Image: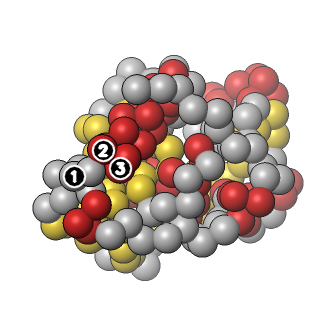
Amino acid sequence: MAIRKVARLGNPILRQMAEAVPVESIPGRSVQSLIDDLIETMREYDGAGLAAPQVHEPVKIVVYEVADNPRYPDAGPVPLTVLINPIVEATTEQVEEDWEGCLSLPDLRGRVPRFTAVSVRAYGRDGAPLTLRADDFHARVIQHECDHLDGIVYPDRMTSAASLTFVQEYLRYHAENR
């Protein structure tokens, strides 16, 4: 396992469409090693999730987990999950705007509208088909990370750049107003 360098906004890898992972290669050493590196890198930087393009790998793999994360102290626990070739669909028309950050845009936060409930079809780490439903913050994390697979970063989803702020200012002026 290794902590990988995280691509920052401006790196062309973040604007590319990721490629599907051949299902037969999921059990292979290279895919499993990448998954281990994604998990280790996400945890090292206190991320709620991480997509393979963020570590310079243009493939459709996402990992996420929230457990006592200092960047998201109000978020409920979300179990460690690996999604390979995910397909995300909204299961409601309800949208909520809330604060997001991203390891590829360090030190920034902005308000992003997201569906409050989604369903996901993907393959799990073991290569077996996986279907899940997620609500609220869990759904937000999934949408945020899966956007990276389509070359989308959260400022692209913001309805206004007026809320874009440095984390220090977010903590000073906005965190208590969540």
Relative depth, front residue between 169 and 145: 145
Q: Residue at x 75, y 44 (%)?
A: 8
Q: Check contact, mark 1 vs mark 2: CB within 8 A.
A: no
Left or right for 102, reference 93:
right
Question: Dot 1 lies on which element?
Answer: loop
Task: List the residue tagged with mark 3.
Answer: 31
> x%, y% of residue 103?
64, 38
Give how far apart the Cα atoms at labels 1 and 2 are.
7 Å
Give how far apart the Cα atoms at labels 1 and 3 are.
7 Å
Q: Check contact, mark 3 vs mark 2: CB within 8 A.
A: yes
Three-letter code for the amino acid on which mark 3 is drawn: Val
Q: Check contact, mark 1 vs mark 3: CB within 8 A.
A: yes
Question: Dot 3 lies on which element?
Answer: helix
Q: Based on the displayed image, in which of its 4 quarters is residue 6 positioned?
A: top right
Relative depth, front residue between 88 and 112: 88
Query: How many numbered badges does the structure rendering display?
Result: 3
> x%, y% of residue 82?
31, 49
Three-letter code for the amino acid on which mark 1 is drawn: Pro
Query: Can the viewer see residue 145 in this picture?
Result: yes
Quarter containing the N terminus: top left
